[in-house]
Structures are given as structure tokens and as C-alpha cells.
Amino acid sequence: MDASFASLVQNIDWAEIWLATLDTLLMLGGSLLFTVLLGLPLGVLLFLTGPRQLFEQKGVYALLSLLVNVLRSLPFIILLIVMIPFTVLITGTSLGVAGAIPPLVVGATPFFARLVETALREVDRGIIEATQAMGATTRQIVLNALLPEARPGIIAATTVTAITLVSYTAMAGVVGAGGLGDLAIRFGYQRFQTDVMVVTVILLLILVQVLQTVGDRLVVHFSRK
Amino acid sequence: MIEFHNVHKTYTVGKREIPALHPSRLTIEGGQIFGLIGHSGAGKSTLLRLINRLEEPSGGRIVVDGEDITALDGEGLRRFRQRVGMIFQHFNLLSSKTVADNVGMPLKLAGELSRREIEARVAELLARVGLSDHAKKYPAQLSGGQKQRVGIARALATRPKILLCDEATSALDPQTTGQVLQLLAEINRELRLTVVLITHEMDVIRRVCDRVAVMDAGTVVEEGPVADVFLHPQHPTTQRFVLEAEQVDEHEQRDDFAHVPGRILRLTFQGDSTYAPLLGTVARQTGVDYSILAGRIDRIKDVPYGQLTLALTGGDVEAALDCFRAADVHLEVLR
């Protein structure tokens, strides 16, 4: 039984798989952190300047919206290459995990910001009105009413973004960032090592499954409805 | 005291201008419960929201206790809003915060009290509305009436001088409506708070209000003490509201009286005269017989009233009418 299993996975270098898993987790963690840090304010800004909202600014909203749409329509693989000079500027390298994080963040932030905007729009207008009636500043309305009320929606948005980032990291191999997706492409696909392909895909599946489950649990935990 | 001086409001939708409130004059005395009644779209909600500037007036001045609040902006407006509480039809509580945190929120935002002081005040407010046991619950775990009581506690947190009620009982069942109205009346008495409430139910006005303004198509068509407006409605809109509250079709009833012999009159009693044995006394003195065709005896806020439609036959009808005129009742001769 053991012998037959070993022959099934003869091409697999488990140390390499472990390194690739680590790279994927590093890329995911790093890029998700910065995506949330940048995307949350951007989403709030999109919401506030949007039509019939607290800070309605047609010009600003149109500009932000266009920027978001341009970045979202760019295929990630192209973004990865176009961004190389910029990536070198901020991380000092265009290679490896560090080289992959800036394009991942730029690719995922507009997506996350749109989801945040949608989550904020789901908040009952009456809640904003009630908070305004208490004499709150716009900043207080955002921090004390909008964000807490939209928290389940924002957590769900973070989950979806994290999973999207997992699939983006597969392309990060182009800049030598490694990771599970890269392993699947280089060994599993290009060298016809089906066992490597299957193992990496299973690991990615487990990762996505864990992210979704944790995300869903958090949404339930923070939903008081 | 809240004064409206030629206040008007027009919404611009696309290129069209839609008037929501025609230039209006209105004075709401301090310490009263003032009711605004009207059908949806009559402009009552706009009028209410102008008081704390959730709606910006298109023109005119609103003066609250001598202060022109239409001139306020930024910090001044926020300070003013902290002195005006508001409750809503759908409660508008934050679902992500506990009952205690909801009630404490206006205090937290005002930033004048320490955490311990806020906790003490919240406990006091929850005790006032009878929800001390529910402090740690979330709004979703409460019934409609409990949610509105949390709303009231929240609105009172900053010790406001004015409480605005936006259809506060429209989402509640009749029994809960009664409890919430009673609480509003108690608060008005104890705290000498001016309450402005809007509703589309005459019954709500009858039970708690001191004065009422009737709105129709963006205009105040009738205004006065509730008893006067309720018992002697002048404007057709007001008459419709009163009939709705009585759940009788008076036109139908009037037709029924066609075959009733004798003089038909309507007597309206208010206050102590409601319990005076007037009919029997007049019948004995003048020899008339009376039959009661329609009637209601109820209370307007704390004042009892009665309104009876009578047919008088036999005896000295004119002398009987004179007796009624001399007595402490309002007389209308219908036929």
C-alpha cells in the first residue's frame, strides 16, 4: 500500500511543496493586509461621494469610479508586468514574494473597495439619519454607525477578496514569486507531472475552503439580526 | 417654543420642482405635545425634519427658543441637534450594538461625559423605560414596543428640550401603541419636554396631544386645541380624519335619521359637564321626550367628552333648546 502510494506521488518534492505553501500564505497575508488598509478607506470614499450620499461629489465619484473600473478591467497578468518599475520603486525588487505583493494589492484593492461600497449601501438610511439627528459629524457617522453596521458585509467582502487573491497568486510565478499555483503551472502543467498538479490543487482547495469557512463563521458571529 | 416663519421647502427632481411644504406659519408652545396629522405626502414628515434640519428649508426662518436655527451650521448645528431627541417609525437602532450601547450612543458622540457617567445615565434611562433587564441584549432580540422604548431612552439621553416623533407608533400593534403613547405622555409631564409628533391616525392625536395641526398637500389647513379640532372639525380633510377615527359613516347615518320624527340636534359635552345629568333634567322641566340616535363618550387626552345626536319630540322643544344653550354644552341644531 505504502509502496503504491509512493509511486503515485513519485515526482513530489515535499520540501518544495512546503516552501510553495509558505510563499502562497505570505503573499496572501501580505497582500490582503494592504488591500484592506487601502481598500476600506477607498470604499468609504466611494460610498460617501456617491449619488445621494452624505458627501455627494459628482466629479470626485466619477473620477474614483473610473480609476477603479480601469484597474478592475486590466487582466492581472498584465498588471503584474506593467507594474514592475513601480514595484521596484517601493520594494526594491520586482522578484519573489515581495515583488508580487504590490501588484496583488493594486489588483485587489479596487475590487475590495467596490465590495465595501456595496456593503455600506446596504446599511439602512434610517440609521444614518438617526445618527445625524444625534449631532454626529460625518467622521463619527462613518466610525460609529456605518462601519459597525456594515461589519458582516465587510467581512464577507474580505473573504471573497482573499479567495480572489489566492487565484491571483497563481500568476505571480511570472515574477518568480513561487507559491502553490506557480508549482502547479511549472511542474504539473508544463512538465506533465500530474501528481504535483493534483497535490497543489488539493492544497489550494483546502486553503480556499478554510478561508470561506472562517469568513462565514465571522459573518455569523457579527450578525445581530 | 418652536416658530415657523414663512418656511417652505421645494424638492428638485431632475428639472422639475416639487413643492413639499408651502410657506407656513406655525407656533408650537414649549411643554406641549403637538400633533401633526396628514396623509402620506402631505408634508408632515418634511415639516418635522425641518425642526432639526435633517431637511434644509428652501426659505423662511425657524426659531427655537429665540434662536434662529436656520442660520446655524457645522458645530452650531451639531450642538443644537444634541438638544433635540428624535424617534422613528422603524426605530433605527443600530443592530450591531447592545441596547445599552444604543442608548449611550448620543452621549458618546457628544463626548462630554466619562464612560462611568455614561453608564450611570444609561442605567437610569433604561430604568425609566422599563428595560433594565435587557441592557445586554441586541435590538433583534426585542419586540417592536421594546425597540421603540429603547429609541425613546436613546432620544432622551442628552436631556433634550424637544422630542420629535416620526410616526413612532405606526409600526406597532394597538396595545403596544397605547403603552408607547402613555410613556410619551409621562415623559412630557415629568420632564416638561416639548413633543412634536406626526401620525396619520386621529386616535393617536386624541389620546396624547394638546394641540394639533392638520396638513394637506403641503399646507397646514387647520390648527388648534385637540378638543376643538376633534369635536368641531372645519376643513374637509380634518372631518375625514375624525370620521376615520370614529369608524362610522356619518352621511349614511344622517340618511337613517330621515324618517325619525322631531327636531334633531347634536350636543357636545366637555370636561365635568360630561357627567352632569342634563338630559333627564331638561326632559322633566320642559316635557320633551328624547331618543339618542348616535353618540360617543370618550376622553381626549385627560378630558372626558361626550357627543350625542338626539331627536326631541313632544313638550316645549324651544324651551328645551334654550335650556341646552344655557347649560355648559355645545349645541348644534341639525334639523
Image: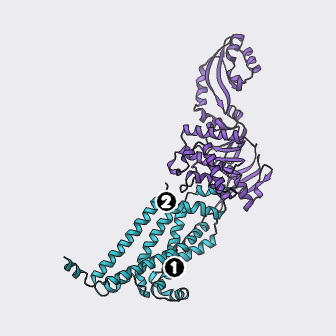
Q: What residue type is labelled 2?
A: Phe
* Image point (59%, 73%), residue name: A62
Q: Are marks 1 and 2 on the same chain?
A: yes
Residue occupied by mark 2: A222
Toward the right, the furthest residue is B66
Q: In which quarter of the image is the C terminus of chain B?
A: top right
Measure the alpha-carbon separation of dots 1 and 2: 28 Å
Q: In this view of the protein, which residue sits in the foreground, A1 or B246? A: A1
**Residue B325 placement (x, y as % from top left):** 75, 21
The answer for which chain carries disc 1 is: A
Q: In this view, does B183 lie above or below A86?
A: above
Q: Point out residue B7 in the picture as x, y percentages from the top left corner.
A: 75, 52
Q: Which chain is tinted purple?
A: B
Task: Tell whether A30 sits left or right of B121.
Answer: left
Q: Earlier in the sequence, mark 1 or mark 2?
A: 1
Crowdedness near tag 1: few (<14), some (14–19) or many (≥20) residues, C-alpha within 10 Å: many
Q: In this view, does A142 lie above or below B199?
A: below
Secondary element at tag 2: helix
Q: In this view, does B96 lie to the left or right of B26?
A: left
Q: Residue at x 55, y 61 (%)?
A: A148
Chain A colour in the picture: cyan
Percent x, y of residue B205: 65, 38
> Badge 2: few (under 14), some or many (20 or more) residues near its Cα, within 10 Å?
some
> Which chain's residue wears label 2?
A
Judging by the rendered image, the residue that carries numbered circle 1 is A106
Q: Nearer the viewer, mark 1 or mark 2?
A: 2
